[in-house]
Image: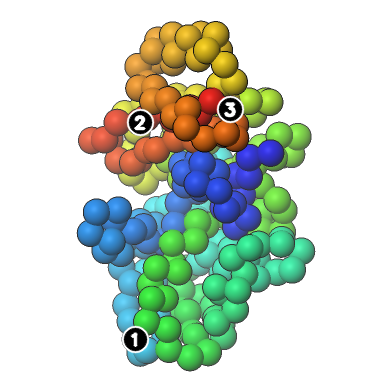
Amino acid sequence: MLQLDPRRVTDAYGLKISRLLFASLVTIDPQSLDVVPDLAERVTVVSPTVYRVLLREGLRFSDGSTLDADDVIATYRSVVDPSIHSPHARNYARLQSVIAITSRTVEFTLREAHATFLTDLELPIVRAEDASAVLGTKDGPATVSSGPYVLVRRTTGHLSLRANPHWYGGRPIHPDVSFVVVRDDVDLVVERDELAEHRVEVRVDASAGAEAVGGDHDPHPADPTRACLRRG
């Protein structure tokens, strides 16, 4: 089953979709590989082992609740919690502490200097109340998002996302996005026609043997959404 919890996801397609649902303190520019603030307004390197993050003002989750330092702390603590079974836990074992300076300021202290730690701040943020749960499952509770979209429906072979009304970046160019698994040529024609009605570009990759579903979307309004379907 496609994993959507950003702390547990490992495959490329789950990674892309989870990033539509959950935003990070920073993102990595795919062209320049520069670290770009996302939920963070700025990141200050206080010393080789201390990083201070100031969150943007007025951040909210998709349910309207405030996104603040407590949520950031809960997320980073949860990723190393054995009960979450995160494959990324080892990357964050280098953290000595994560503390709140103010409701908008979080300080990360490392056990030792790590030159690329800024890229580790790309871990998506979940709500503190949800930090101990596995998120995005088909039969689980509604997913409360920090990113540009909200998961509104998940069935076998199909995901439906809708724009998060509280997303700090504003309304995405596509308010509704669907992801589907296409198993054969008949399904491909049907799904292509249905997605075309929503003005979503369809790209097909038939080179791989496994069934998969994925997408690629920059949440900022200037860029288009592209649904990527793969046939098994």
Looking at the image, which residue is at 36% across and 57% down? 27
Marked residue nearer the N-terminal end (1 or 2): 1
Closest to the observer, 129 or 30 = 30
For marks 1 and 3, the one nearer the N-term is: 1
- Identify whether 19 is placed above or below 125: above
The residue pinned by badge 3 equals: 232
**Residue shown at 35% from the left, 31% from the top:** 225
Horizontal and vertical percent position of residue 162: 48, 29
Q: Residue at x 47, y 32 (%)?
A: 207
Position of 16 with respect to 130 (left or right) is: left
Q: Say whether disc 2 or disc 3 marks the residue closer to the N-terminus.
A: 2
| Amino acid at circle 3 | Gly
Name the colour scheme: rainbow
Q: Quadrant of residue 187?
A: top right
Q: Nearer the viewer, mark 1 or mark 3?
A: 3
- Mark identifier at residue 46: 1
Q: Is mark 3 on a helix, strand or loop?
A: loop
Q: Where is residue 26 in the image (x, y as percent from the top left)?
A: 37, 61
Give residue 225's mark: 2
> Is residue 82 something that shows in the picture?
yes
Residue 188: give x, y in percent of width and height: 50, 14
| Residue count near mark 3 (Cα–Cα under 10 Å), binned few <14, some 14–19, many ≥20 | some
Rendered image quadrant of residue 24: bottom left
Q: Tell me which amino acid carries mark 2.
A: Thr
- Residue 191 percent location from the top left of the image: 50, 14
